[in-house]
Each structure stands twice: as C-alpha cells, then as structure tokens.
Image (cartoon, helix red, strand yellow):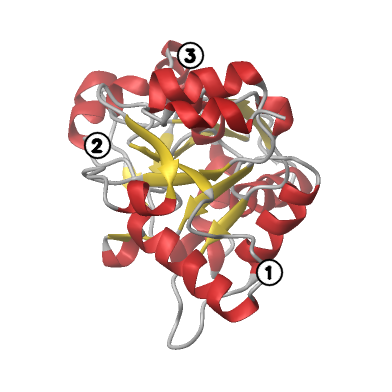
C-alpha cells in the first residue's frame, strides 16, 4: 500500500462555495484527485465552477450510486494512489454514508482525516434561539412513497415532548429529482399523522418553528402556531422544522425577538 494513501473529508458548509474553510481550500489544492457529492444536502448557491477556479483543480461530481451501491470504490482506488479529497455539504460524517466510506478506507489501509464545515444542526438551532442542550433525538420527515407517511417523526416528537425536549426535524431531500420538502409539506405530513394517531402531539395550538436557508445571507425564521407558520412565505429551500418542548424564559424571549412569535409564547414558559 502507498504510504501516501489518504482520503480527506472536507465540509463545504451550508450556502455557497465561499463557505468552505481556508484549511479545506488548502487540502483541495494539495490533493491528487477531488470528488464531491451533492445529494445529501441542498446548496442552491454552490458553484463548483467557481470553486474549481479558486483552487485550480478539477472536481468530479459523483452520483448517489457511487457511494451507496458501489461503496465508493472509485474514490478508494484513487485514494490508494495518493491524497484524495471528498467534498461534502455541511459538516462531513453527519451522514452515515460518509461514516461507512471512512470505515472502508481505514480497513483498506487508507489514512483518513476530516476538515469540518458549518453544520445544519448547529446553524438551525442557533437561528432559533433555543438552547442546544435541550434538544432530544432529531428526525427526518420523509416524503410518502405511494402511501401513508412514516409514523417515525410523530413518535419521536412525542417521545421528546414527554421529556420536555425540543425536536429538530430535517425535511426530506431528493437531489436526483431536484425536490426538497417544504415547511408547509412537513407540517401537513405531521397533521396527517395526528389525524391517524390522535395522541394530541400535533394540534392547532402546537408551537412550531420554521427555518429556511440557514447559513445564507438571508435566512428566514418564523415561530407560531401551525396555521400561522403554514401561511408564512419562507421562500426557497432548504427548509427545516423545530417542534419545541418546554421553554426556558430566555428561549421564549428569543422566539419573540428573532422569530416573530406572538408575545403569548412567554406565558408558556414552564
């Protein structure tokens, strides 16, 4: 095995090609080959061409199948020859697909390293004004594939609420179809699940927070009851949802100040 065999996972950040770190740029410039996957998250303003011009390197976009069906074979084969970079939206290794690839690389004698980028998790939580240590398990609200939607989001929200914890809901993305779930679609899915399960986890009075384009120059954050948030124009994706649990008084003040929540939210503090 080549002693220089190396695979470096580099985070692209959240919005455009300027989000990548200076360390990440250096890693690309020093690499023999550079790949990028763009299906695990949406970066509408990312220009691979501009990034290529900045680093003076060609960047190969790999489809979903290369990582999921082919187990990243072409990336690993290149990494065995010398330093190779895989560019990933957000912060690397948040997606289990990338963890699997890193494990495979190490088992094949390929050294791996990680250059972190801005994470959607910290960005969304930060924009909401809620306290990060009060979040429970996060969950994805998926598109319903020819039937009734998965009950997992409803169950996770209920479990978190029972403990007074907030729930961060990622909204499904189908990059190959250029399709992203909106906040409106996500809330309609939760309402449909409530209509089926009838456990009063999602009601007309449930406080929800919608966040659009976290990490961009103009993110949008709106908190309120479901109908209020469903009628709000969040603009382009990516979108995310938070279903709060019990609020600290400072969290309530933050929602009023930063997310346009009604003043009555302060009265919900427990």
- Pointer 2: residues within 10 angstroms few (<14), some, or many (20+)? some
Q: Which residue is mark 2?
A: 48
For the point 43% across and 16% down, the residue is 21
View extreme (bottom): residue: 146
Q: Position of residue 57 (x, y in %)?
A: 29, 29
Q: Position of residue 183 (x, y in %)?
A: 37, 53
Q: Position of residue 201 (x, y in %)?
A: 64, 60
Is there CB contact under 8 Å for labels 1 and 2?
no
- Total marks placed: 3
User: As displayed, is residue 239 above or below residue 121?
Assistant: below
Question: In which quadrant of the rendered view does residue 125 lie?
Answer: top right
Q: CA distance from mark 3 to mark 2?
A: 18 Å
First in residue order: circle 1 vs circle 2: 2
Dot 1 falls on a residue whose secondary structure is loop
Q: CA distance from mark 1 to mark 2?
A: 46 Å
Is there CB contact under 8 Å for labels 1 and 3?
no
Q: Nearer the viewer, residue 67 or 175?
A: 175
From where the camera sits, is residue 107 visible?
yes
Is there CB contact under 8 Å for labels 3 and 2?
no
Q: CA distance from mark 1 to mark 3?
A: 49 Å
For the point 29% across and 20% down, the residue is 18
User: As displayed, is residue 221 above or below residue 188?
Assistant: above
User: As displayed, is residue 65 above or below residue 13?
Assistant: below
- Pointer 1: residues within 10 angstroms few (<14), some, or many (20+)? few
Q: Which residue is mark 3?
A: 23
Q: Which label is found at residue 199?
A: 1
Looking at the image, residue 136 sits to the left or right of residue 34; the answer is right
For the point 40% across and 20% down, the residue is 258
Dot 3 falls on a residue whose secondary structure is helix
Q: Which label is found at residue 72?
A: none
From where the camera sits, is residue 142 visible?
no
First in residue order: circle 3 vs circle 2: 3
């Amino acid at each position: 095995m080549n002693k220089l065999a190396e695979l470096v996972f580099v985070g692209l950040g959240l919005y455009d090609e300027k989000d990548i770190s200076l360390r990440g740029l250096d890693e690309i410039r020093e690499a023999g080959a550079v790949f990028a996957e763009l299906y695990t998250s949406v970066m509408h303003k990312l220009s691979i061409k501009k990034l290529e011009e900045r680093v003076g390197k060609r960047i190969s976009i790999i489809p979903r199948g290369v990582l999921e069906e082919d187990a990243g074979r072409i990336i690993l084969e290149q990494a065995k020859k010398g330093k190779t970079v895989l560019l990933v939206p957000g912060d690397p290794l948040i997606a289990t697909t990338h963890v699997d690839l890193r494990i495979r690389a190490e088992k094949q004698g390929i050294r791996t390293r990680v250059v972190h980028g801005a994470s959607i998790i910290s960005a969304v939580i930060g924009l909401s004004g809620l306290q990060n240590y009060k979040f429970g398990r996060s969950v994805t609200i998926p598109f319903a594939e020819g039937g009734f939607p998965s009950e997992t989001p409803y169950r996770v929200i209920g479990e978190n609420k029972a403990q007074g914890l907030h729930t961060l809901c990622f909204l499904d993305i189908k990059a190959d179809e250029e399709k992203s779930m909106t906040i409106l679609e996500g809330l309609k899915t939760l309402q449909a699940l409530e209509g089926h399960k009838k456990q009063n986890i999602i009601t007309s009075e449930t406080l929800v927070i919608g966040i659009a384009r976290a990490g961009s120059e103009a993110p949008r954050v709106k908190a309120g009851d479901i109908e209020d948030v469903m009628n709000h124009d969040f603009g382009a994706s990516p979108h995310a949802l938070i279903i709060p649990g019990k609020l600290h008084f400072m969290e309530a003040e933050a929602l009023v100040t930063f997310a346009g929540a009604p003043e009555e939210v302060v009265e919900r503090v427990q």
